[in-house]
Amino acid sequence: MKTARSEQLVLCHDCRLLVRSRGDGSSACPRCGSPLHQRRPHSLARTWAFVIAAWVAMAPANLYPIMTVVYFGDGEPDTIASGVMRLAEEGMLPIAMLVFVASIAVPVLKLLGIMLLLLTIHFRWALNKMQCMILYRIIEVIGAWSMLDLFMISILVTLADLGAVAQVSAGPGASAFAMVVVLTMLAAISFDPRLIWDLQEEAHD
Ligand SMILES: [Zn+2]
């Protein structure tokens, strides 16, 4: 298959100008002057670094209390898991499910998805490339929803701070959870999806 790479063409990452590469890998874009690369440099290493950091941040995010709701002077700090259980026990099943999906299922599935893409490229697994691409798109789309939980906490903290009646405060787990979200986003951004197709080109050579 004819690709820009096989024709020695490089797309500028910044201004999207298509440039004929001189093959030494050191050229700069003639229009905007930014460095030209065939693929995002060190895409795999960077993505791995962000994925591992996100898994590390996952521990405090789940072990430390994410928020404390004190209602009529009564309440204790809740971790994500105990918060979900409490919501379910108090009959708020839809909200419990929403919190579970937004703060446990989505981050874990997203990280596993990125790892599957990385491992596929690393070990040259013969996965269907179209399925890899669908997985990549799902990761991008659900990424937009991973802020939902923090958003909910911040709304609760602002709205429900009713002094003596009810007090809501964010715990240290919330900061760790924000780190998980940001690191996972950075991992998805550093991943160059063209690497998936490079495998297929190599297989045909
Ligand atoms: Zn440019």
Image (spheres, grey):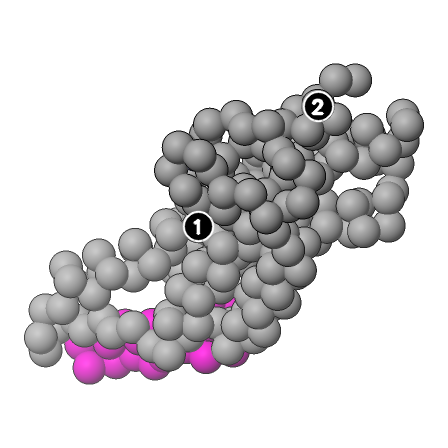
Label 2 and label 1: CA atoms lie apart by 39 Å
**Residue most extreme to the top:** 2
Q: Is 179 positioned to the left or the right of 55 in the image?
A: left
Residue 141 in sight:
no
Type of amino acid under label 1: Ser
Q: Which mark is residue 1?
A: none
Image-quadrant location for residue 199: top right
Q: Secondary structure at mark 1?
A: loop
Residue 146, labelled with which disc?
1
Q: Does the segment drawn in magenta span residue 80?
A: yes
Q: Position of residue 151 (x, y in %)?
A: 30, 54
Residue sitting at 68 percent across and 29 percent down? Answer: 8
For disc 2, the neighbor class at 10 Å (few under 14, some 14 to 19, many from 20) is: few
Q: Which residue is mark 2?
A: 7
Picture coordinates of residue 96, whole percent (x, y)? 44, 54
Residue occupying the point 21% across, 65% down: 157
Asked if the magenta segment contains residue 24, the reply would be: no
Indicate which label's residue lies in the foreground, 2 or 1. Answer: 2
Q: Vertically, is 135 above or below 59?
A: above
* Quadrant for the N terminus in the image: top right
Q: Decide: marks 2, 1 in contact (CB < 8 A)? A: no
Q: Is residue 155 left or right of residue 35?
A: left
In the picture, the quarter occupied by the C terminus is: top right
- Nearer to us in this view, 59 or 163: 59
Q: What's the magenta region?
A: 63-83
Q: Is residue 123 visible?
A: yes
Type of residue at label 2? Glu
Q: Is residue 164 left or right of residue 50?
A: left
Number of callouts in the render?
Answer: 2
